[in-house]
Amino acid sequence: MKPTPYHKNFLRAGKAFTHLIRPAVKVDLPDVLQVPTSYPVLFAGNHRSLFDFIGAMVIFTKFGMSSRLLIRADLVNGRVGGPLFQGIGSIATSSATRQEAEDTAVDALLDGQLVSIMPEGRLIPPHERAETGVGPARAGVSRIARRAGACVIPVGFTGSERVWPRDRMPRVRLPRPTVTIRLGEPLLFTSDDHQANSDELMTHLGALVRRLEE
């Protein structure tokens, strides 16, 4: 896949995160990261914690890859993390900038870059994921994938909420908690029903997450 225009910054940040978290968190990553070459590739992960962003950085960096990440506009434009998010090429998204964000993501995919999204669109609290393992998806992931002709790769995150709980600051725990990240089989959406496509993705993503938690 084609490196993003922010590739060097992305890898530098990813390596810094990898070293920074090592004393406090064990990140269990797959041994290989196989990316289809016949289609643009859109990664889609479940979202339980702000640590998921760091996990995404770590896994891509391990394999020398960079990705455009769709991230909440208030974080991308914020004073604290904004320079970092902007420096690695994050795509700011909000209800006000949805079309612009989707256009940018589609353009990046058509250019051969990797793009990553959290299709739930928010941090999912425990009571909403009790049975399925994931929350409901928004239709944006399907709109982007269908416009770009991209395959969607489910990415399951588990354990991240123990490192950085929802609505709390990160905390150090002993023994070190483990964050596990695994990839599912690529999906190709064929329907023009974007919500149905997004729901199908979450069915596969939920099954992946539940397997990781067994």
Image: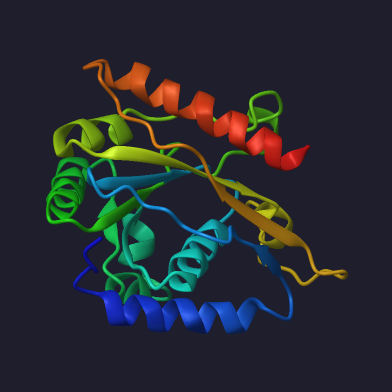
Q: Nearer the viewer, residue 25 or 82?
A: 25
Residue occupying the far right of the picture: 175
Left or right of 191: which side holds 44? right
Percent position of residue 134, x then y: 58, 33
Q: Does 204 appear above or below 176?
A: above
Please name whichever residue, 148 or 165, is drawn nearer the observer in this view of the structure.
Answer: 148
Q: Which image quadrant is residue 13 in? A: bottom left
The answer to which quarter of the image holds residue 28 is: bottom right
Residue at screen point 35% across, 75% down: 10
Left or right of 210? Residue 177 is right
| Whether residue 134 is visible | no
Query: In this orientation, which residue lies closer to the viewer: 173 or 2?
Result: 2
Residue 41, compared with residue 59, is above or below; it is above
Q: How is the structure coloured here?
A: rainbow
Quadrant of the image for the N terminus?
Answer: bottom left
Identify which residue is drawn at 20% across, 50% down. 105
Residue 162 in view in this figure? yes
Q: Name the residue rendered at 32%, 45% in the picture.
A: 42
In the drawing, does residue 57 fall left or right of residue 78? right
Rendered location of residue 183, percent (x, y)? 52, 46
Q: Residue at x 39, y 62 (%)?
A: 75
Q: Position of residue 197 (x, y in %)?
A: 35, 22
